[in-house]
Image (tube, rainbow, N blue to C red):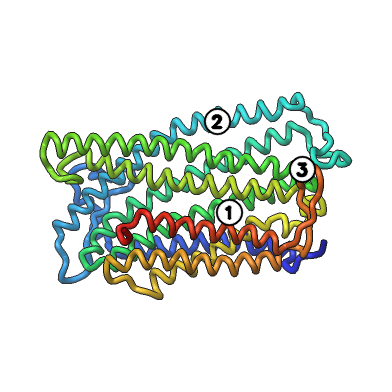
């Protein structure tokens, strides 16, 4: 056992600062993407969907570059973008109405089930993993678990919605930039994707960190109860992801089949032809399923893994000895991950330039390798400054002593396993290999 190099105050500062850096970087990327085109008069060039400015999609996109200022193409892109954006927003608002009902109903069930374990007792009870200590009553666990569930659900919904907004905002801009070359289009698409990624990770980290500190005001030294209540955060995120992925996936597949049957079979027009209204529905489905649903799904996985690690830490020597910095090791890893990904993003957008289609795949591979190498260094650094040299973990009823390098090894193996899986999958699915 021993003390950590990083103080509790340093942890209190580092985590929210990294989260805010991630949010700020995402907003910077959004601003850069928005500069691709500008609105001249605030009126829509579309005579169809979205022409009345409904849902905020009324701007006409005017290309500023000289020599390629084909307004008819730009206006057509704007018209299609408006239709897709309005459809995606309408679908999500409708879906979220039903999700809201489920969210409230499930939150009530969580409260009733957890509270009824001890008959809604308001008296302190013996802790599960240390019967010599007294923990907060079952009613408190039920209340705070319900609150954390709602926090996770709302954050998941927001993550998916923000991902959809940037996707529908950037699609026409990517198309217009593609007229200048594949490199320009790649940068716009990459930056818009970075907006979703950074907002998702940073928002999830910040909300979880704030929830832990607010709950700590009530729980005090009862860290077992605190992090048991925090697990609701991951449950809320994964519950909303279910609706986003399944609902959006069914919608996009139905629209895809309908577009193919009507367009190619009945009307004999090319696939994804804008004259086919079902093509717009198909693109709407791609946004709400593959982007909004993916955003909620990624957040759910991120929140669940973080909460599970925190629970394991709370019943180890970190929780027993109230070592705050070591307890928040999972969040420190996520914080460093935001900084590493920020630096890695610059390699794709600023340090190197993609000039041809064949360079895109190597550029994305390079991103994976660079981020993995840098993150390995980051994990080693966090393990060194945030963990004592030796500590104990709860192992089937007993406390087992382990060393900090063993925890670093576990995280590092998971990191590199992800890289290997990515390359193996790419080898068997890419057209670059037999």
Q: Residue at (12%, 42%) from the top-left corner?
A: 269
Image quadrant where residue 16 sits: bottom right
Residue 205 badge: 1
- Of mark 1 and mark 3, the one earlier in the sequence is 1
Residue 398 marker:
none
The residue lying at 49 percent from left, 59 percent from top is 420
Mark earlier in primary sequence (1, 2): 2
Most distant residue in the right direction: 132
Dot 2: what SS? helix
Quadrant for the C terminus in the image = bottom left
Q: Which residue is mark 3?
A: 396
Q: Nearer the viewer, mark 3 or mark 2?
A: 3
Tell me, for residue 104, which label it has, or none. Answer: 2
Circle 3 SS class: loop
In three-dimensional space, the C-alpha distance between marks 3 and 2, rounded to whole angstroms, equals 36 Å
Q: Is residue 115 left or right of residue 73?
A: right
* Left or right of 7, for residue 351: left
Instruction: Tell us which disc is closer to us: 1 or 3.
Output: 3
> What residue do we see at 47% from left, 45% from top?
296
Quick one: 285 or 65, which is closer to the camera? 285
Residue 241 % position (x, y)? 48, 40
Q: Position of residue 61 (x, y in %)?
A: 24, 57
Which quadrant holds the N terminus? bottom right
Taking depth in this image into account, of 84 and 357 the one nearest to the observer is: 357
Determine whether label 1 and label 3 are within 8 Å by CB.
no
Cα–Cα span, label 1 and label 3: 30 Å
Position in image of residue 96 (x %, y %)? 44, 36
Q: Residue at x 53, y 44 (%)?
A: 300
N-terminal of the pair, mark 3 or mark 2, is: 2
Give the crowd class for mark 1: few <14, some 14-19, many >=20 residues within 10 Å.
many
Against 139, residue 329 (above or below) is below
Mark nearer the viewer, 1 or 2: 1
């Amino acid at each position: 056992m021993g003390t950590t190099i990083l103080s509790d105050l340093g942890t209190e500062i580092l985590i929210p600062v990294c989260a805010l850096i991630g949010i700020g970087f995402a907003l910077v990327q959004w601003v850069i993407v928005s500069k691709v085109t500008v609105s001249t008069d605030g009126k829509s060039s579309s005579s169809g969907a979205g022409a009345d400015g409904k849902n905020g999609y009324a701007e006409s996109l005017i290309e500023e570059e000289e020599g390629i200022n084909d307004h008819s193409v730009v206006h057509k892109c704007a018209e299609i973008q408006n239709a897709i954006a309005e459809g995606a927003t309408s679908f999500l608002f409708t879906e979220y109405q039903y999700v809201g009902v489920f969210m409230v109903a499930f939150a009530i069930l969580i409260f009733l089930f957890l509270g009824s374990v001890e008959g809604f007792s308001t008296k302190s009870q013996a802790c599960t993993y240390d019967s010599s200590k007294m923990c907060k009553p079952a009613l408190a666990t039920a209340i705070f678990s319900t609150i954390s569930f709602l926090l996770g659900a709302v954050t998941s919904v927001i993550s998916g919605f923000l991902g959809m907004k940037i996707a529908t905002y950037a699609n026409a801009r990517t198309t217009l930039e593609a007229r200048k070359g594949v490199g320009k289009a790649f940068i716009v698409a990459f930056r818009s994707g970075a907006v979703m990624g950074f907002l998702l990770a940073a928002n999830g980290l910040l909300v979880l960190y704030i929830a832990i500190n607010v709950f700590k005001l009530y729980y005090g030294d009862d860290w077992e109860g605190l992090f048991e209540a925090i697990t609701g955060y991951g449950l809320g995120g994964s519950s909303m992801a279910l609706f986003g992925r399944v609902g959006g996936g069914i919608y996009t597949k139905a629209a895809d089949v309908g577009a193919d049957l009507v367009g190619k079979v009945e009307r004999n027009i090319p696939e994804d032809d804008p004259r086919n209204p079902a093509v717009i529905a198909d693109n709407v489905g791609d946004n709400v399923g593959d982007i909004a649903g993916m955003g909620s799904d990624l957040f759910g996985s991120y929140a669940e893994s973080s909460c599970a690690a925190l629970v394991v830490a709370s019943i180890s020597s970190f929780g027993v000895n109230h070592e705050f910095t070591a307890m928040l090791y999972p969040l420190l890893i996520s914080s460093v991950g935001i900084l590493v990904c920020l630096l890695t993003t610059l390699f794709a957008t600023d340090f190197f330039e993609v000039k041809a289609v064949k360079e895109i795949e190597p550029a994305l591979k390079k991103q994976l390798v660079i981020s993995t190498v840098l993150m390995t260094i980051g994990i080693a650094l966090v393990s060194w400054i945030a963990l004592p040299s030796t500590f104990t973990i709860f192992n089937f009823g007993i406390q087992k002593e382990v060393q900090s390098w063993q925890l670093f090894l576990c995280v590092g193996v998971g990191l590199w396993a992800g890289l290997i899986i990515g390359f193996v999958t790419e080898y068997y699915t890419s057209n670059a290999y037999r």
